Amino acid sequence: MIVILAGRRIDASDAEEKRFPLEMKDTVYKKIMKFFHRNNITKLVSSAACGADLLAQKAAGELEIEQHIILPFSREKFRRTSVIDRPGNWGELFDEICDEVEKKGNLV
């Protein structure tokens, strides 16, 4: 099964309405892992924004699921505007995952 994910980003520090607070990241990660295991996922396609996308990409890498990342503009701009602009120190994870996916030719 192929999963195409358009996930939610971690809430900004000053978010008035809480939708994905940073403290839920571990819970969401565990649920993604469980979903991938239960459904025999073979391929993941997503961006790599902080939050559900990066958590799913991390899980896919750990489970040796084929990963594909599609970014709407340059990696550097995406990192600045969709990864490190929210709480949680997502930059290092983004870099590691993108480097691995890029080595396989699956970063667009």
Image (cartoon, rainbow, N blue to C red):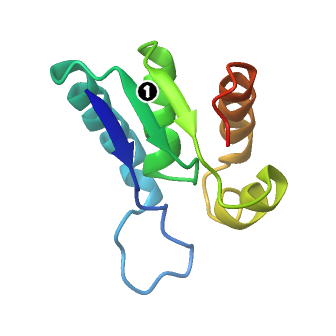
Which residue, given by chain and number where applicable, does mark 1 sit on?
59
Tell me the SS state at disc 1.
helix
Q: Amino acid at mark 1?
A: Ala
Q: Residue at x 63, y 64 (%)?
A: 86
Closer-to-camera residue (12/41)? 41
Residue drawn where x is 57% and y is 73% of the image = 13
The N terminus lies in which quarter of the figure? top left
* Residue that sits furthest to the right in the current view: 76
Q: Which quadrant: the C terminus?
A: top right
Q: Is residue 93 above or below residue 67?
A: below
Residue 21 image-quadrant placement: bottom left
Q: Quadrant of residue 103?
A: top right
Rendered position, 77 above or below 108: below
In this view, the residue farthest toward the bottom is 16
Give how far across and how far down residue 66 sits, in percent: 48, 21
> Which residue sits furthest top?
64
Q: Within 10 angstroms of label 1, few (less than 14), some, or many (20 or more) residues? A: many
* Residue drawn 18% across the image and 24% down it: 39
Q: Residue 53: x, y in percent?
A: 48, 47
The residue that appears at 46% across and 39% down in the rendered structure is 45
Image location (x, y in percent) of residue 2: 32, 31
Using the rendered view, name the quadrant where residue 83 is placed: bottom right
Q: Number of numbered discs present?
A: 1
Where does residue 34 sit, x and y in percent of width and height? 23, 27
